[in-house]
Amino acid sequence: MAIFTTDNPWVLIFGVLGNIISIMVFMAPVPTFCRICRKKSTEGFESVPYVVSLFSAMLWLYYASLKSESSAFLLLMVNSVGCAIETIYIALYFTYAPKQARMMTLTLLLLNFGGYCSILLLSHFLAKGSARVQLVGWICVALSAAVFAAPLSVIRMVIRTKSVEFLPFSLSFFLMLSAVTWLLYGLFLKDLYVAGPNVLGVIFGVLQMALHAIYRKRNNDTSVGKLSSDTQSCNGHAFIIFIEAF
């Protein structure tokens, strides 16, 4: 198929692997939403990770649509799937959340939509051709860097408490694997906007794996081995966001 044509087979290999792993990460919250639907309550979970993840996927979808390379189809595909999945999550959350949480989610969605439209309009009128790709690329890099830095709070908590209770091993592993895959995809494609932020992803991933190696014996969390898109402590003092970035 022409849409998969590429001069470098490694671009296709790592692009396909990146799609598979990223979709697995996107599907991580399914057990959480099954419980929400079953209990008809959001149980204090926040909608922020899903709204931010939707915004990230929308921006990368726009960036991929500006690319002329046929291999950009892989970015288009994974972020289209991501937008669809995150939209379903948000719809389910909105259905079962209390009124105050619904209003907060609606506010976030409006900010999401407003921010996306502003970027769309500004990039359209202020830049043309390759300059537009570069502008949107840098915006995506900035957002991805912020997303990859999100686990810093939980890393500090792990070091302070000497426990990886709020740092699920499976999630950390798959996010690091995803970052490695997209880093290699970006390098072989010679797309620094894709490769750049994933350098941070790999660094934070290695750091989280090191923390697991150091503190795993102290961890009595029975949920280790499960994937989850967000983890909250029972007392509500810790709210950790893990969001896939490409």
Image: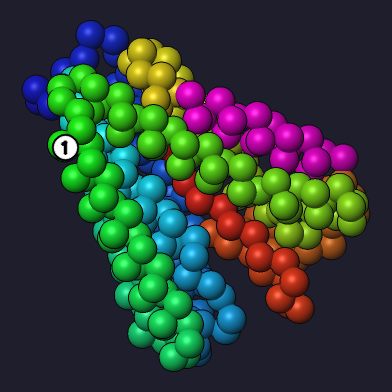
Q: Going by the picture, which residue comes out furthest to the top?
A: 7
Residue 233 location in percent, x, y?
A: 73, 71
Does residue 46 show up? yes
User: In this rendering, would 43 be left or right of 204?
Assistant: left
Left or right, 45 with respect to 185, comes to: right
Residue at 80 percent across and 41 percent down: it is 211
Q: Main secondary structure of the magenta part?
A: helix
Residue closest to the eye, 107 or 72: 107
Toward the front, the furthest residue is 126
Q: Is residue 38 above or below residue 131?
A: below
Does the magenta-highlighted stretch encompass residue 208? Answer: yes
Residue at the (57%, 84%) spot, across then down: 43
Q: Secondary structure at mark 1?
A: helix
Please tell me which residue lies in front, 168 or 186.
Answer: 186
- Which quadrant holds the C terminus? top left
Magenta residues, start to end: 196-214
Observer able to see residue 18:
no
**In the image shown, does 132 or 183 lie closer to the viewer?**
132
Q: Residue at x 15, y 22 (%)?
A: 129
Disc 1: which residue: 124
- Looking at the rendered structure, the kind of residue marked 1 is His
Left or right: 189 in relation to 223: left
Dot 1: within a 10 Å radius of its alpha carbon, few (fewer than 14), some, or many (20 or more) residues?
few
Is 192 placed left or right of 161 in the picture?
A: left
